[in-house]
Image: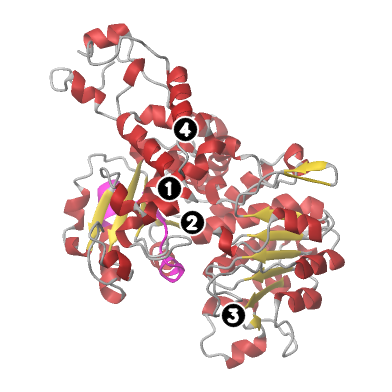
């Protein structure tokens, strides 16, 4: 059935509507009835043939940025074909659609701007945000991806040019998690930029002013959040993307009490870190209480990961949080976090205090010294900027996890877990090949940057990428299904457990702790099922009664299918 009034919309307008256009897949009878004859070439292609043509053309483009632009143009003219192409070629196109390509797209957004894929809210809109939100034509939005472009990974403050990162995340909520494209709204909040190069760029598309902070910033964010809840309902998921870590943490604390708030760089990284630990534990040996964790990097991201891990350990073993934290240590550029530092350093951040242990003064000044002292079973790198541990250097060519560090891990632990979670590649603590070589192949490696397969000890090693793509799409779908009222650690832990449980023996044999990325939609369905079930059981759901059927079947039935719809009977 035609989803519009044929007396209102013309054939040309239909072909220009990305939401409804099928291009050369319109059947001949559809072309007759919808006034399309003559507006298309005579041939009729099915969607599978269209996908083959698109991917063949896309592979002839050598630049990742240009491929991204080509996909964006495809989305504008044929939404369902875009998602079919991405779904059928997921592993090939994810690096183009998302990071690392999207970071470069953000850098060049002023030159690449074509047409809006969301809403722009600026300081000039303060006082009239709700009226602006009403310009968005869809009322049933279930997830909003917000960015202020202050900390685009690997680049920094790009102001309004951070919008492509929000658009990318919104697209992945559909491509990986199955939310309908109309259910997800990207929003850029433009409060200026401190990037002087952009302020002087004649093609910069945002406000030409220094970044606003403090009370004025908080008032605008409050107005945006209250407007979104008024427009789309109190259960809309607020996903904060590419904010500075300090601001992201404040926003999470500010809105998590009475909204469904999510910060991927905090909760998402914490969840996928926990999933990696759970998945690796059988090979590490012993229980979680037998492990010692050393975090290299003591920012908000690392602390959030440690907090979730401690919560899970306390939950699994019936102990208190302080007891669960006893075997978790942090090192920053000043050395190990110790109780003495906590007592003497007035500027020590609050999130570090729970991990300030009794350690002899002067010990653990470097990562290597700390490994030799503590003999950790897991080494987790979570640096957030290039000056961590190498203060004053302009480029971190030196890897933080050196051969000596990795060798020390292997000396003290039979199966050490090595997690190099910093991005982009310039911050990566070590590569999978380096970790395997330095530990004689005994390590379990988890990296946040993509690794190519390599041969070691007569077998092929294909490490999986530690990416939040495994977490947030299914989490968003599960919250939508359950009409989640809040996002608590219990739901995030469920998501992590679902990801870990999806790993197969075949994955493990190849050195992976997660399923292959082409399987993320299937993983997302399992994540959504567990999150929805947990939300309903724990009173975090607005559903009055449990839906009929199993949660997994319900999750799969919710997932967006990009197959074309017939427009005539």
As drawn, 224 above or below 143 = below
Q: Name the residue beneath numbered marker 1.
A: 169
Residue under the point 76% across and 79% down: 369
- Segment tinted magenta in the rendering: 226-249
What distance separates the C-alpha of mark 1 from that of mark 2? Answer: 10 Å
Element marked by disc 2: helix
Mark 1 or mark 2: whose residue is earlier in sequence: 1
> Foreground mark, 4 or 2?
4
> Foreground mark, 1 or 2?
1
Residue under the point 36% across and 32% down: 74
Residue under the point 40% across and 27% down: 81
Q: Name the residue beneath numbered marker 2.
A: 264
Which disc is residue 60 wearing?
4
What distance separates the C-alpha of mark 3 from that of mark 2? Answer: 23 Å
Element marked by disc 4: loop
The quarter of the picture where residue 137 lies is: top left
Which disc is residue 353 wearing?
3
Label 1 crowd bin: few (<14), some (14–19), many (20+), radius 10 Å: many
Q: Which of 296 and 355 is in front in this view?
A: 296
Mark 4 or mark 3: whose residue is earlier in sequence: 4
| C-beta proximity under 8 Å, tags 1 and 2 | yes
């Amino acid at each position: 059935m035609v989803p519009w009034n044929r007396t209102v919309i013309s054939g040309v307008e239909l072909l220009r509507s990305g939401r409804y256009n099928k291009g050369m897949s319109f059947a001949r009878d559809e072309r007759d009835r919808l006034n399309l004859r003559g507006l298309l070439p005579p041939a009729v292609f099915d969607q599978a043939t269209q996908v083959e043509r698109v991917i063949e053309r896309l592979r002839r483009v050598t630049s990742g940025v240009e491929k991204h632009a080509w996909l964006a143009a495809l989305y504008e003219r044929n939404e369902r074909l875009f998602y079919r192409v991405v779904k059928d070629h997921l592993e090939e196109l994810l690096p183009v659609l998302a990071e690392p390509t999207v970071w470069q797209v953000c850098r060049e957004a002023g030159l690449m701007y074509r047409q809006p894929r969301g809403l722009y809210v600026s300081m000039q809109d303060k006082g009239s945000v709700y009226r602006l939100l009403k310009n968005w034509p869809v009322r049933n939005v279930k997830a909003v991806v917000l960015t202020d472009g202050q900390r685009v990974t690997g680049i920094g403050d790009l102001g309004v040019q951070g919008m492509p990162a929000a658009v990318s995340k919104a697209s992945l909520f559909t491509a990986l998690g199955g939310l309908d494209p109309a259910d997800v709204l990207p929003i850029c909040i433009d409060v200026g930029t401190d990037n002087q190069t952009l302020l002087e760029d004649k093609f910069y598309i945002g406000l030409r002013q220094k970044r606003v902070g403090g009370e004025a910033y908080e008032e605008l964010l409050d107005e945006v959040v209250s407007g979104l809840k008024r427009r789309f309902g109190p259960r809309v998921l607020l996903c904060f993307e590419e904010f500075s870590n300090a601001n992201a943490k404040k926003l999470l604390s500010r809105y998590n009490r009475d909204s469904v708030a999510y910060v991927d760089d905090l909760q998402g990284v914490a969840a996928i870190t926990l999933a990696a630990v759970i998945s690796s534990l059988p090979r590490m040996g012993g229980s979680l209480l037998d492990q010692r964790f050393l975090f290299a990097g003591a920012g908000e991201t690392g602390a959030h990961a440690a907090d979730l891990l401690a919560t899970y350990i306390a939950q699994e073993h019936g102990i208190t949080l302080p007891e669960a934290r006893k075997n978790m240590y942090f090192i920053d550029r000043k050395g190990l976090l110790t109780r003495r530092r906590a007592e003497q350093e007035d500027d020590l951040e609050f999130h570090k205090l729970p991990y300030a242990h009794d350690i002899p003064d002067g010990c653990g000044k470097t990562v290597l010294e700390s490994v030799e002292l503590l003999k950790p079973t897991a080494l987790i790198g979570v640096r957030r900027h290039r000056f961590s541990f190498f203060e004053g250097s302009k480029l971190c060519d030196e890897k933080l996890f050196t051969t000596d560090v990795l060798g020390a891990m292997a000396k003290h632990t039979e199966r050490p877990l090595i997690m190099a979670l910093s991005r982009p590649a310039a911050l990566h603590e070590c590569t999978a090949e380096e970790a395997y070589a330095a530990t004689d192949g005994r390590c379990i490696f988890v990296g946040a940057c993509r690794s190519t397969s390599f041969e070691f000890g007569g077998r092929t090693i294909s490490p999986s990428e530690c990416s939040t793509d495994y977490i947030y799409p299914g989490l968003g779908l599960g919250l939508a299904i359950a009409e989640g009222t809040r996002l608590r650690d219990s739901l995030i832990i469920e998501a992590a457990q679902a990801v870990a449980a999806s790993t197969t023996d075949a994955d493990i044999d190849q050195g992976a702790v997660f399923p292959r990325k082409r399987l993320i939609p299937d993983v997302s369905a399992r994540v959504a099922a567990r999150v929805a079930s947990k939300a309903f059981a724990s009173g975090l759901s607005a559903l009055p009664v449990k839906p009929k059927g199993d949660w997994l079947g319900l999750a799969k039935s919710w997932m967006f299918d990009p197959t074309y719809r017939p427009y005539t009977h």
